[in-house]
Structure formats: structure tokens, C-alpha cells
Image: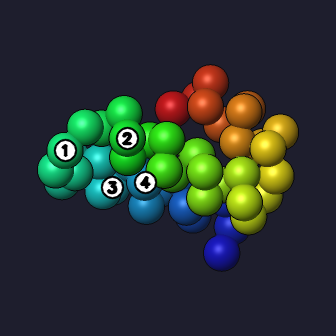
Amino acid sequence: MSLETLIERYRETLPQVMGPKSRFKLNFLAVVARLFGDDEALELEKRL
């Protein structure tokens, strides 16, 4: 799965999140860091 697809899924799911959206975002960035590297996650954090 590409990073862009993951970002699309993140944005589609965001309105349905129960609990703190900040935690959801951090968990998503952790997945991105694991799959694509820390640098990619840091760049993505600025875009979200």
C-alpha cells in the first residue's frame, strides 16, 4: 500500500474516530514511521 493511499484512508476515517483525535494522529504517524521511516513521518506530520 502506498503512503498516499494510507493518508486517504486516514482522512476518510478521521470523522468516525472515538476518543482523542490527537492520539489517533500519533498512532497513524507511528505506523507511517514504521513502514516508511521517521523522516517521512516527520514530513507528513506537517501536512496533516
Q: Which SS class for mark 3?
A: helix
Nearest-to-viewer mark from 2 and 4: 2
- The reply to whether discs 1 and 3 touch (Cβ–Cβ < 8 Å) is no
C-alpha distance separating marks 1 and 3:
16 Å
> Residue 47's image quarter?
top right
Q: Mark 3: few, some, or many residues within 10 Å (few <14, many ≥20)?
A: few
C-alpha distance separating marks 2 and 4:
13 Å
x and y percentages locating residue 46 in the rendered image: 62, 24
Q: Could you tell which of marks 2 and 4 lies nearer the N-terminus?
A: 4
Q: Which residue is mark 1?
A: 19
Q: Could you tell which of marks 1 and 4 lies nearer the N-terminus?
A: 4
Q: Which residue is mark 4?
A: 10
Q: Which SS class for mark 2?
A: helix
Q: Residue at x 79, y 44 (%)?
A: 38
Closer-to-camera residue (42/5): 42
Q: Residue at x 69, y 67 (%)?
A: 2
Q: Amino acid at mark 1?
A: Gly
Q: Mark 2: few, some, or many residues within 10 Å (few <14, many ≥20)?
A: few
Q: Amino acid at mark 4?
A: Tyr
Q: Which residue is mark 3?
A: 12
Q: Residue at x 29, y 48 (%)?
A: 14
Is residue 30 found left or right of 26 in the rendered image?
right
Nearest-to-viewer mark from 1 and 4: 1
In this rendering, the answer to whether 37 lies above or below 20 is below
Q: Which SS class for mark 1?
A: loop
C-alpha distance separating marks 1 and 2:
8 Å
x and y percentages locating residue 39 in the rendered image: 83, 39
- The reply to whether discs 1 and 2 touch (Cβ–Cβ < 8 Å) is yes
